[in-house]
Image: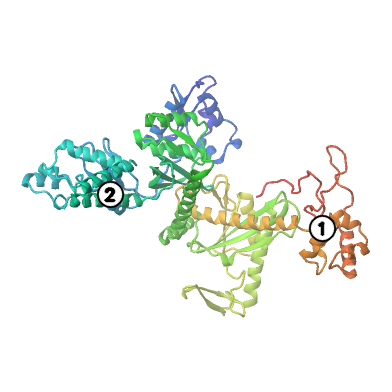
Amino acid sequence: MADPSSYRPKPGEIPDSPGVYRFRDEHRRVIYVGKAKSLRQRLANYFQDLAGLHPRTRSMVTTAASVEWTVVSTEVEALQLEYSWIKEYDPRFNVKYRDDKSYPYLAVTMNEEYPRVQVMRGHKKKGVRYFGPYAHAWAIRDTVDLLLRVFPVRTCSAGVFKNAARTGRPCLLGYIGKCSAPCVDRVSAEEHRELADEFCDFMTGRTNTYIRRLEKQMAEAADEMEYERAARLRDDVGALKKAMEKNAVVLADATDADLIAVAEDELEAAVQIFHVRGGRVRGQRGWVTDKVEEITTGALVEHALQQLYGEETGDAVPKEVLVPALPDPVEPVQEWLAGRRGSGVSLRIPQRGDKKALMETVQRNAQQALVLHKTKRASDLTTRSRALEEIADALDLDSAPLRVECYDISHLQGDDVVASMVVFEDGLARKSEYRRFQIKGFAGQDDVRSMHEVITRRFRRYLAEKEKTGEWTDGENDETPEIDRNGEIVGTGPTEDDGRPKKFAYPPQLVVVDGGAPQVAAARRALDELGIDDIAVCGLAKRLEEVWLPGDDDPVVLPRTSEGLYLLQRVRDEAHRFAITYQRTKRSKRFRSSPLDDVPGLGDTRKQALLKHFGSLKKLRSATIDQICEVPGIGRKTAETIAVALARSAPAAPAVNTATGEIMEEEPGTMGSSGEPVAAGAPDERRGQET
């Protein structure tokens, strides 16, 4: 691990101008490429105190061994150079999008003497017109089959074309009218190219021109009583309309635009793009990326734009690009796009109307793509097996941990301290085994002490169940098969009298705690105090995704692409989600509590009637029993119980505004976190950070 101060440039060496910089490791490999409006200001951010850097940035600067830069004239040039270097060096700390699949395009080879229509994948070639991408190759072939009767462009390979020219006989498509047969000189090269141009014009969205022209020709043929020709033209119009119907109109103003949406979590991001031409969705594609650097949504959008348009020119870059967040600054990116297109490009966030509605659809697709990516990765049996093996190797376990339990502590500035226990068996979440804990042993904020208490309580229950049933001690094992929803035996274990599995009877092979060395030490100490020495313990620190083992001074660092690390992250994130959900539920319940909740038999209807009658809890507290009895539905005995409950919860002193010294009055009918009225303008909930 390098010290950034060892390669920090001297003051004054870095120019105060736009440019692109590269960080290299000790082997001179480029590990990060970035651009800046001011190289001096940007690079200075990397050489501040390491504690103030984002964990991923800190990991990058400590991996690097040198930094170099190149000065350019404008921010647009910096953007272009950054894209070129990322493509060239493939730096490990830069965001790199990877396609979910190799998308097929409809391509027209305008660089040939006789242009050919075909399906193409992979890198784009110069002089070829591309349309799409499409989700499936068969969708391209269906569209082409409809259009060939109107635009009979060549679709055959070079070998078939040469053989037809040699024999003087066209292929089958030439005989049935779906190819103009330039191979046997039925049309000249110029006429065939004109057909290809018309085909491309139709695919770019200029559809109405050709339909109106064919309808006019059809009417003229009918007037001249050339009914067979009119029928053929009618069928041509039907074919064009059928091809258009395959893409529904989504934008009524025949807009040409690309819509980009981003769905992300802390580890990965999914990007979805809809290509709209002539108001219709002509193509869709998506990427998924690991977030290996500290990055905002706007920066993700900027990288997506580079990936999408870095090698495109002309009409391939639309007049309008709609995004969920704008890059900062947006002007250089917009100027760069305009340069790629050759004319102005509008880069903006849709605010209302059809475009905003379509963007919501794209966003849902992006979210679904992210969920599907995670599900596929998690559900693959081979991947799960490899992940468990990697964990066993990294932690030096005797066998793969088939049952993993993870614990997390959550609170709000020391209030409502709770813990979660989630269970993964064979790499999959087993939600029926999840458990929640309230911290009871002490009050206040102490994650280490809380972790010790939770581990102690969980495994004390395990020992109690083990002792009660005599399992794993005297050889008499009261086990019953556990059956999954498909009726298959998935495991055996101790059960209650009614056949349900005991809550804490199954021991894990691995305990994972959310935290670093202190939390791991607390968990290990709790197990040692209970005499349990056959369960492994580790911790996953969220800041740098390091794995900590008990008693080790240095963490175990798994590769970023490790399936074992990915599984540990999923387990940790699930424990965090489960703990946060429980903590928020408890907090909301506490904030909604009222002294009237302690009155037996007093439901929500009569509580609302009391508050509506008196106007506030303060006035209700000062009311006599006879006055309370005046409320419909409140008898004398209930009124006495209400008066006693309110007297017990009376505040010791009035609330005072510490800034002005005045006594704060309540707003009628509003109630605070302890059941007391909230002063007008005063916040009810104490601010804090959830953990």
Secondary structure at numbered mark 2 = helix
Residue 313 seen: no
Figure coloring:
rainbow
Image height check: is 345 above or below 486? above
Q: Taking 621 as reference, is 350 left or right?
A: left
Quarter of the figure with residue 54: top right
Residue at the (30%, 50%) spot, across then down: 140
| Front residue (pair 578, 227) | 227
* Image-based side of 176 in relation to 361, left or right: left
618 vs 566, left or right, is: right
User: Element at badge 1?
Assistant: helix
Q: Tell me which amino acid carries mark 2.
A: Val
Q: Residue at x 58, y 35 (%)?
A: 50
Question: Horizontal and vertical percent for residue 301?
Answer: 48, 39
Q: CA distance from mark 2 to mark 1?
A: 70 Å
- Return the residue nearer the eye: 298 or 541: 298
Please state which of residues 607 and 75 is positioned toward the viewer in this rendering.
Answer: 607
Q: Amino acid at mark 1?
A: Lys
Q: Which residue is mark 1?
A: 612
- Residue 261 x, y percent position in the rendering: 48, 45
Give the residue drawn at x 28%, y 49%. Answer: 237
Residues at circles 2 and 1 in contact by the CB criterion of under 8 Å: no
Can you give x and y, in whole percent of width and height, for residue 147 in the image?
A: 26, 48
Q: Which residue is identified by label 2?
A: 237
Q: Nearer the viewer, residue 486 or 363?
A: 363
Q: Is residue 601 visible?
A: yes
- Name which residue lies at 35% across and 37% down: 316
| Percent position of residue 320, x then y | 44, 37
Q: Earlier in the sequence, mark 2 or mark 1?
A: 2
Instruction: Categorize mark 1 by other alpha carbons within 10 Å: few (<14), some (14-19), many (20+).
Output: some
Q: Is residue 293 above or below residue 651?
A: above
